[in-house]
Image (cartoon, helix red, strand yellow):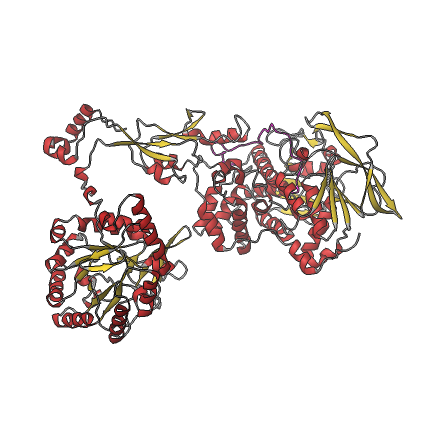
Amino acid sequence: MDRSPLPLEQLQAAFTETYPRYTENEAFVEASRCLYCFDAPCIKACPTDIDVPTFIRKIATGNVLGAATTILESNLMGHTCGRVCPVDELCVGACVLGAEHRPIAIGRLQRYATDHLFATGAMPFEPAPPTGKRVAVVGAGPAGLSCAGELAKLGVEAHVFERSELPGGLSTYGIVVMREPVAVALEEVEFVKRLGVQVHTGVEVGEDLDPQRLVSEFDAVVIAAGTGKVPRLGVPGEDLEGVTDALDFIAATKMAEKDGLAHLYDVKVGREVIVVGAGNTAVDAATIARRLGADRVTMVYRRGLGDMPAYDHEVAFVRNEGVDIRLLTQPVEFLGEGGRVVGVRCVRMALGEPDASGRRSPEPVPGSEFVLPADQVVLAIGQEKRLGLFAAFGLEVAHGYVKTDAELRTSHPKVFAAGDCARLTGHALTVTAAQDGKIAAKAIARQLGLDVPAPAPGEPTGRPILTQPPVREQVGGVGG
Amino acid sequence: MADLTTVFAGVRSPNPFWLASAPPTNTAYQINKAFEYGWGGAVWKTIGDPVLNVCNRYGAFEMGGQKLLAINNVELISDRPLAVNLKEIAEVKRLWPDRAVVVSAMVSSNPEAWRTIVQQIEDTGADAIELNYGCPHGMSERGMGAAVGQVPEYCSLITSWVTEVASIPVIVKLTPNVTDITKPARAAVAGRANGLSLINTINSIVGVDLDSFELRPNIGGKGGHGGYAGPAVKPIALHMLSQVAIDPEVKAAGVPISGMGGVQTWRDAAEFLLLGATTVQVCTAVMHYGFRLIEDLTDGLSNWLDSKGICSVSEVVGASTHRVSDFGDLDLSFKTVARIDEDKCIQCNLCYVACDEGAHQCIDLTVDGVRIDPAALAADRASLKAGVGPQGRKPQPKVREEDCVGCDLCSLVCPVEGCITMVEVPPERPSVTWNELVRTRPDVTTDWDAMNAYRAEMGIDIH
């Protein structure tokens, strides 16, 4: 494991935003293709109900500020969502032009609009006069910022407490820079702050701040703390030098990008990298390892192709990057020499009977062990739940997540929860986190007796009740 | 392969496509090049009195990324010295004996000036003269161009000055900036014109710059009306062409018409031919794409004629003019209804909103064949989000044929080719026209009670 062997120019190209910003004319031409459907399916497919045909028409008419306003009215995290949303699964997937034509590039148009607004520094919203109500939000990721911003618009004094040095959550630390540069995440935070939200970083609730004090001093508390580190795999050799947490690996490249892409040389990368896991985080880590110059990157996954949690387009993308995927392969030991990892002992798996999740459970094939050489191992096998924090607030928990009702009330009457920490079911995406923030903000405002605009006809007041199995990835990939 | 040879007032050309008098026909260089590409004829950019031009000269009307849907111009007639033009015309005609070389002219309104220019043009060997009675800017303020074309008496008088002295055919080019195009057309015929051409450009201001508040085209901070041409004017040109083509006096005189105004493709040209044009002139399309367009113009027209089993382009000239009718002679019992092909429908619902808010409320949105209350659409959206009912279902627009008034708006807004068609259905009552009603049941056409009684009698229900 060492610094990237690549020349700076190549590194810069590999870590620049994948899709260049639309020129004015490109945006106009693409926006002009939109049919402006009535009761458009793209709106239905957006978890935050962005009025997509309206904002696209505004781009086509040259009212780009108005377009951005339409987006941010529905989703204060629209600047990030335009970059990271799995649009093929959402709005673009619903576009009526997808059938026989080319669907509208909604994400890129959204990004064009919000980029314009952020470049001009415009503030299209005027927060309501102060109500005297105060709400504490734990976590400055998309759910917390969305919630705090919506509360600030209603005249609530919102304080966000963030344990990391920088606000923005996964937008700042977890989404690969090819998809979202750190500056984008930070300017989105600045926008929320301009609504009146106070963001306190480097403050860990439960360590630096007593949870009970928050409950007693604020009118309501929102837990939007996300998830924790990648858990241990529980095999020998996990403490060897060269065994890395995928989130730390990605975060290192984010911080390098923030300081200038030359700092990517500060990120250590192996020549032969094994990534354990098969979700979108694993895809991101594998992509980064390749782009930092690893000769060979192999993802190992104990189940089959169809069970991979990463989106299909992400899987196709990472294969295109030159990453090998070893399916039905389970690491059983990390091998070391002189304290450094040199290989991964794996065992072949075979699919047995369906388990509780309905997937056929993999079982080791006796005598099938083999060793893959590796000088870096990146673990991307999920994230730990922040059970200690939940307990400190005395919250009921279900399967490691804060238990809430559809309006995101927890078992504690003054405490709400939003985002990944409360996402027992459904898609853990930036856009669903942003929607959670809106739902919680409205529920809090109603609880505090504030003047909340009545829901528009059909406007959902709570979370959708999803029946499909949860998709457990938050980070969002670089492909597609 | 169909014969595209055209004879217009005795002037032959190998195909009906002439370049209109405009910037593409400014020089011998351009016209030689155009003839090498295969253009059948060219009308030389108007020669006449001395002028000086301005810049900017052109402005464009654009929409949805489509450039030059129309062009607006304030360029004047040829600003090259008259002698240079005359010399080049002679040279071009000598080089291209088989092509139609027509010279557009415009001089001050006195007989002597016209006699002189006619003689100068004839000396070049040109095939015909086109009198520019259409230029709407610059020249009209000096009493020329549209200033003549808008006054039938002037039109007739000046035409007769020219036809008295000319030995080659005289074509009069009409301005569309009039209320009734047949008036100047008849005046030109009265002046013994050998042919008519139309339309010249339409008065227009193409736009205002929202940053500077200046007009487009901007001429040193000012602007004014210019001549509007290009694809967007085609429907106006077709209408005016049809009015002239069916005019009894024009028909009686037997003068041919050279049609123009927005011709960009062979399809456009075919429509001009069907409505009575013997030749078709092209300008804006060439300004946009160059002379090479002629290849598809002739090839496409020829293939279309072949596909119709028509041997000669002359056979289609005016073939649709007998269908041009006044409203009063249209059959009130003719009935069509809209049908939506649900296999092709992409559920954009543009037909629904157009019908519901812009027309006659005959399209429903349905789910599983059951009409849904439009007011409940939003609630339906919420239920979709909440996972109630099948995920991702989209409302399907359906026409209530018994209520459909056959207006055709839905099929016009539908973005899917062949998805909505207007289907002719058997008439529900005997054929009758408004004019027949005026004759046979005059009370019905003037009195609402009588009209209501008539509707009840005929089973006409208007919701």
Q: Across the whole image, how many numbered discs are drawn on residues?
A: 0
* Pick the front one: A95 or B103: B103
**Is residue B373 covered in magenta?**
no
Could you tell whether B241 is left or right of B1 in the image?
A: left
Mark yes or no: residue B73 visible. Answer: yes
Q: Residue at image x 37%, y 35%?
A: B420
The spot of residue B349 in percent (x, y) is: 41, 35
Magenta-colored span: A452-475
Against B457, is B54 above or below? Answer: below
Judged left or right of residue B333, residue A388 is right
Percent of width and height locating residue B424: 28, 31
Q: Residue furthest right?
A: A338
* Relative image position of residue B308 (x, y in whole percent): 29, 43
In front of the other: A180 or B143:
B143
Rendered position, B230 above or below A382: below
SS assignment for the magenta stretch, majority: loop
What's the residue at 22%, 53% (across, down)? B278
